[in-house]
Image (cartoon, rainbow, N blue to C red):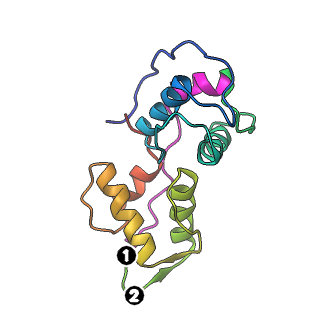
Amino acid sequence: MTITQNLQAPPFPGAISKPKQGEAVKKWQQRMKDRGWHIQADGIYGDISERLCKNFQAEKNLQVTGIVDETTWNKTWTAPSEQAPPFPGRVLKQPPIMKGEDVKQWQDEMMKRGWPIKVDGSYGPKSEDICRQFQQSHGLQPDGQVGRNTWTNTWVETV
């Protein structure tokens, strides 16, 4: 389901940064996961949480600090406004290994959202594996190919 409206943010629990742990961290992580970011809601604010926070802040044009401040916290419960860039016109798949800026653009967005992928512009077995995992986690046909639907869903946050 695509986020179409803002949700009421829970009360701000105070700034979240490394090495904080607890229910507030878990609540923020779960909301990010619900939005489609690749993060575990384990209640531990470590390197991965900080990196995703920075990526989220950059995407939302917030001050990039890696600290879940009140603005970041509230924005986490706000409906997204971004849309996917235009589909590149070709399905990313392999074999053979496909290369190009469209591959790099897709890999970069996947990496920003927390998927462990190398941004090298080559769509090989690792990219295909990450694609299948992404598709499965988003209820898409896990064929390992970045077609129009997978491309669009890469940028769409869901709940």
* Percent of width and height locating residue 106: 51, 62
* Percent of width and height locating residue 17: 69, 33
Mark 2, residue position: 96
152 or 70: nearer the viewer: 70
Considering the numbered disc 2 on the image, is that residue within a helix, a strand or a loop?
loop
Query: Dot 2, crowdedness within 10 Å: few (<14), some or many (≥20)?
Result: few
Question: Is 100 left, or right, of 137 in this rendering?
Answer: right
Q: Amino acid at mark 1?
A: Lys
Q: For the magenta stretch, what is the residue range?
A: 71-93
**For the stretch drawn in magenta, what is the main secondary structure?**
loop
In the picture, residue 104 is in which quadrant?
A: bottom right
81 is within the stretch colored magenta = yes
Q: Amino acid at mark 2?
A: Pro
Considering the numbered disc 1 on the image, is that residue within a helix, a strand or a loop?
loop
Question: Is 52 left, or right, of 69 in this rendering?
Answer: left
Q: Which mark is residue 93?
A: 1
Question: Is 114 left, or right, of 125 in this rendering?
Answer: right
Answer yes or no: is residue 78 visible.
no
Above-or-below relation of 70 to 123 = above
Above-or-below relation of 19 to 77 = below
Identify the residue shown where x is 59% and y is 68%. 119
Separation of residues labelled 2 and 1 (CA atoms): 8 Å
Residue pushed farthest bottom? 96
149 is within the stretch colored magenta = no
* Percent of width and height locating residue 12: 60, 15
In the picture, residue 57 is in which quadrant?
A: top right
